[in-house]
Image (cartoon, rainbow, N blue to C red):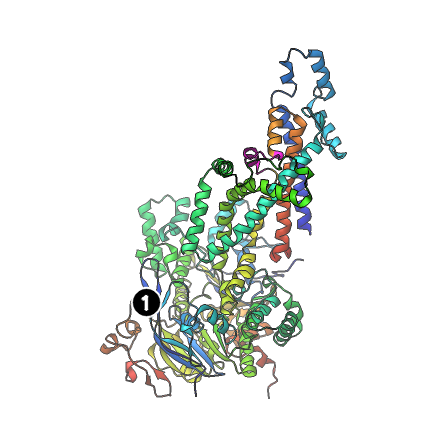
Amino acid sequence: MRYLARRFLHAAMLLAATTVVTFLFTTLAPGNYFDEMRLNPQISPETLTALKARYDLDKPLPVRYLVWVKSLAHGEMGYSFAYNSPVLPLVAVRARNTLLLTITATLLAWLIALPLGVWSAEYAGRWLDHVITGTSAILLVIPDIALALGFLLIAVQTRWFPAGGMASVGAESLPFANRLWDLAQHMFLPATILVLIAQPILVRHIRAAVADVLGEGFIRAAEAHGIPRSRLLWRYALPAAANPLISLFGFSIGALLSGSLLVEVVTSWPGLGPFLLEAILARDLYVVIGGVLLSTVFLVAGNFIADVALFWADPRIRTE
Amino acid sequence: MSVRALDQVSFVVQPGTRIAIVGASGSGKSTLAACLACLEKPSSGSICFQGRNLEFLSESELQNIRPQVQLVFQDPAMAFNPIFTVLEILEEPWILQTKLNSEERKERAAELLGRVGLPRRILDRKSADLSGGQRQRLAIARALALEPKILILDEALSALDYSVQAQIANLLLDLADPSIPLAARPAVLFITHDLVMAARITDEIIVMQSGRIVESGPMREVMRNPAHMATRALIAGASGVSSSHEKRPAV
Amino acid sequence: MEPLLEVRDLSVRYQMRDGGEVFALSETSLRIESGEIVGVLGESGSGKSTLGASLLAMFPRNAAIHGGAVLLQGKNLLELKRNELAHVRGSRVSLIFQEPGVALHPTMRVGLQIEEVLKAHTSEDKAARRREVRSLLDSIFGTEAERVYASYPHQLSGGQRQRIAIAQAIVCKPSLLIADEPTASLDSVTQREILELLKRLQKERNLAILFITHALELLNGFADRVMVMYAGEIVEEGEAAKVLRFPQHPYTQALLTCRPRLEQIKNSPNKAHIPVIPGDAPDLSAKFLGCAFAPRCPEKMQICSERMPEFSNAGNGAKVRCFKFGG
């Protein structure tokens, strides 16, 4: 248990440090939201100064940081200049959209990669292995953007599935089941791209971890006891290979909010990625910090969940 | 929860002697070996080498002492970096500590191999290509390269076939033969659970159990008249009699 | 009477990465009767482990069988398919290895690991399996059984782990247990305890045991018969007491003198050299023309390098492959 407490403390400190660094970097970047307005002759300098004062942009950095932390404690994440509204609700909606996509894609990716990796290890050197690792290699080499655009092209040409967006026009008025189907159709393109991007890395790691374990003595011993091969693979080999895979899964969780920017932009999925990008370009300070904070929470949480899972899954760590 | 690996262990190693440290697993003998080779620090107590307490020595002074206490382990498979050739393994300390050129180092290495009964031609081979017995000889050669005052063998023979054990035991007998002048003869600490081999090649014995020394003395005496139960159990195990037979009363 | 298991002229070769071959077993034959303990004495490279594994038809990927049969009550195991073999392994013939720490799954409780074997071979439900395993552990571990059942391998000592491995091997009541150097990584006191356990199991269950080892002193008082292997062949076999005390084959004789004996040491300790077997270990990369031991044999004759001797009867009832006795 002490081990877990230590890991949690570690995670919390990491989070705090990230907020400071992000704050620092965003404010150190030259320019602020109102610079664009300066170019507009219709807005007087006095208005600008007043606006800046209103948003505290004239106060020194540490003061702004503390004010922000204080508001965080109240459950607020600052104010968006561009949207003229609190950051949290804006970011929350976008984050939800992203999570819908990425959770589905991550689960699918792992569900597909696990059997591929396991079979690849089991039949190492034979044709099935060559097919799987060959395909993985090809996927790995194709740049993500090419993959994304390629599928976008297929979507546009064949019209088999929607080429962008998250919902059809007027979808809100549909009954739940139809809305769900509509969502699924729109999710098909970005999710497929994400799954294909993730496949090679996952399969490779799973294959390596399982192949390592298959050479171990207890697999041979279980074979000598007549344990059927399929049980040997799934109940003996895979759990024994779990440690590196749990860490990998921690990364997957960590990337839930931050790993899908490219795909979201290409497929016009209204997620956190494009929203943050826009905010960065517009110097919408608090949106950027809010978005980064949320992403970091996931990253740190992902790591922490991996720690917990390792603790639970490996008795050797538990009984240290 | 802390475990006492070693509990109030005290003994003296005289130069050039052959001592066996025997005990069942968990008796603490390997921890003792590690402490003597400066691989582990004792929680309390002192280890004095040539009269100097290791705890009070600086790092550079310890650097001078470590080569003089050499340790050979049990597992010949893992003792060497698999990508090094035999020559590279042997000449490493000489590259760091002496000014010999590569020809001289090669000659020295070949000579060292000869001392342990290995042919010169294996200088170019990788350690992974050697047999278990050859690897252990190489480990002893590497230990001898630094001309140690103490050679510690921690279950170094246990993984080998008996015919190979005999060959290496003979090597150890030669290295520590009393007829060799003290200056050139290392003290040999033979740590094992194999009482038979220990009795064959050493003169003194220390018996350990649960981290303590329970009996010690000249080998012949202790073998003939073992005082402690642990010693008797080891003798029984070695004689082909099970320990449970020991408990039956004599009829 | 039909033997429990019979090996006929089994030859096994390994294909090495550099293209060469290793002749691990050459036309080896043996018989094991029900309930008997047979010791296989040999050094590394003698083929003893290959022999043990072949009784379960467990061969590494690079092994090729060049003839012979392994007959379990008349049925040739080498002809069975993988899933048929899985029925035989663990339930009619079992195997335990040298390193028990390596033979157990690191993150599964040991009690469950034994239940897994039951699950693979019986249709008992979970509760029945648990009861059976608990009672088996009771008989092997006594009062410690409860704690051991719920433990993970790393929480157990070497001796306890080997006992778990034995429990796994016998839980489905096989008729033959192959033990490949099961005590090599254990200290001498624990070794004796394991041997006692095996002996007890033999009596209780009429379990035949093939005990493979290089430690000849273990076979004394334990094995009924002993076979000595060298370079992939059995060179001597007979009653354990006879082979171990009055060996006939020059290799067996040489091997036995290599190992010091405590009684000898106690009576006349000397620090002269221990006798060794001269020469190098046999080169298994090619089939031998004559007797494989000839290059190192002190009694070598001309005919020894020309062809391999057949089995003949030595004076004491043992069978020896040596031209000294005919062949």
> Which secondary structure lies at badge 1?
loop
Residue C115 appears in the rendering: yes
Q: Position of residue C305 (x, y in %)?
A: 24, 74
Q: Image height check: is C23 above or below A64?
A: below
Q: Position of residue B223 (x, y in %)?
A: 52, 75
Q: Tally the numbered discs.
A: 1
Q: Residues within 10 Å of mark 1 (few under 14, many from 20)?
A: some
Front residue of C180 and A167: A167
Badge 1: chain ID: C
Please provide the residue range marked out in magenta: A258-272
Q: Please indicate whether residue C247 sits to the left or right of residue A203 in the image.
A: left
- Residue that numbered label 1 is attached to: C284
Q: Residue at x 34, y 54 (%)?
A: B125
Q: Quadrant of the C terminus of chain B?
A: bottom right
Q: Is residue B185 magenta?
A: no
Q: Quadrant of residue C313?
A: bottom left
Q: Please indicate whether residue A201 sits to the left or right of residue A36 in the image.
A: left
Front residue of C128 and C237: C128
Front residue of B226 and A117: A117
Q: Position of residue C283 (x, y in %)?
A: 31, 66
Q: Position of residue B138 (x, y in %)?
A: 39, 58
Q: Quadrant of the N terminus of chain B?
A: bottom right
Front residue of B90 and C30: C30
Q: Name which residue type carries label 1.
A: Leu
Q: Residue at x 39, y 47 (%)?
A: B94
Q: Please indicate whether residue A211 sits to the left or right of residue C288 in the image.
A: right
Residue A14 appears in the rendering: no
Q: Quadrant of residue B245?
A: bottom right
